[in-house]
Image: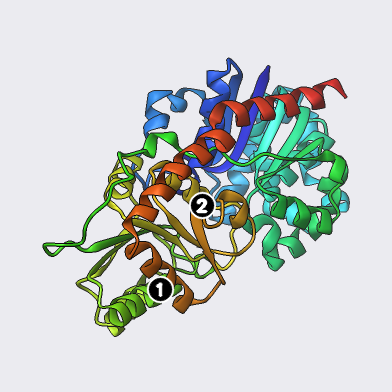
Amino acid sequence: MKVAVVVKKFPVLSETFIINHITSLIDKGVDVKILAYQKNISQPSHPQYVKYNLQEITTYSEFVPKSKIVRLLVFFKLLINNVFFQNKFSFLKTLDVRKFGFKVLDLDLFFKAQFLVKEANFDIIHSHYGPIADDIRILKEIGLIKGKTIVSFHGYDFLKKDVLKRYKNYQKLFKEVNGVVANSLFTKDKLIDLGADPMRIEVIPVIPSFEVIGSGNKINDHLDGHRFKILTVARLEEVKGVQYGIEAAFLFRNKFRVHIHYDIIGGGSCYNSLLQKIKDYNMEDSIFLHGPKSQDEIASYYQNADVFVLPSIIETQGLVLLEAQMNGLPVIASRSGGIPESLIENETGLLVDKQNAEQIANAMFSLYSNPSWRMEIGGKSKNFVRDKFGPNQLTDKLLSFYHKQLDL
């Protein structure tokens, strides 16, 4: 089976699930090609990226000049090469204003077609995120690529109103795509509300990073100056609710007089506002923003934490919750979106109302004050993730879905 995995930027540390998707297919003997719009050179390499030599199977889009004049010059060069010298007249269809509207005049679709069709014949073309899949839909429609099309939705692509407006609720995509992968029942329901055919949707959670497992599942007695160690791994965006985690840590410390050490891993647009919030609470000696970290570094944070907190306002699955539970950590998370599907309430973690710092603080104290319960939760957490979210069973389910499309 020949599979193309199409993404916007690659590799991205906050999207380890895409690398896990690719490497799991490779482990099953699938011939995989990665097609990426942009190369990400600003972050440390994911260990699986290096281990599997993924750079060898990745094709990146050619640089699209920002200057309109330079863009036109490059456009004419490519046009002459593809259309007149190689007789690939299908490329002209990417410029059809009547069919695709005046947006084609920015030449974005034309440039995307240049690299997406270098290896145009696949059994399966699997796009991550709706907007990418819509590009594939158009290129398949005009005959530039061949293969059954699959799209995985993950979050912003079906939750943000401006994205849905731009792509008209994916009306055309849902009619023409062969299969849709939802990472949770919550995501599936949202996609059905938008008009997706339930018969074309398969719920397959994304595969967690099993290489971030530390020793975990330890107990500290909180004597001799030990601090209760709290961990959050998340993008620092408003939707992730990290501000409520910080507020909860402040309440937890002041209400219950507990010495804490709260590590927050991740980058994003809210970094400065969160830093200011920490200063306003006078907690610079207790709460630490670390920015993005490599998988190896994150593993060490999991190993040293006592509890994991994910206070998201909305979350389609909660991948980091699985990673935390694999490390034997009890988790505290918002009762929001697909999060309840990623833990067993009161057995592998605690659920709280979203945007409720007081409930998070109380949950922290419940786990802090009962070390034996924390140990019990940690043991159940590991088994829960291993049994329900193991890479073998999830990849087998995905391959079965692929074969189903090929047999139709």
Q: Earlier in the sequence, mark 2 or mark 1?
A: 2
Q: Which residue is label 1 attached to?
A: 361
* The image quarter in which residue 400 lies: top right
Given residues 219 and 269, the one toward you in this image is 219
Q: Which residue is label 2 attached to?
A: 347
Residue under the point 74% across and 61% down: 164
> Answer yes or no: do the residues labelled 2 and 1 have beta carbons within 8 Å?
no
Given residues 393 and 115, the one toward you in this image is 393
Given residues 83 and 26, the one toward you in this image is 26
Residue found at the very far bottom of the displayed protein: 280
Is residue 119 visible in this depiction of the protein? Answer: yes
Q: Residues within 10 Å of mark 1 (few under 14, many from 20)?
A: many
The residues tagged by marks 2 and 1 sit, at their Cα atoms, a distance apart of 19 Å
* The image quarter in which residue 79 lies: top right
Residue under the point 28% across and 45% down: 300
Q: How many marks?
A: 2
Q: Residues within 10 Å of mark 2 (few under 14, many from 20)?
A: some
Amino acid residing under circle 1: Ala
Position of residue 230 in the picture relative to residue 24 (left or right): left
Is 62 rendered above or below residue 371?
Answer: above
* The image quarter in which residue 4 lies: top right
Q: Which quadrant: the C terminus?
A: top right
Residue under the point 55% across and 46% down: 64
**Rendering coords of residue 365 (x, y %):** 36, 69
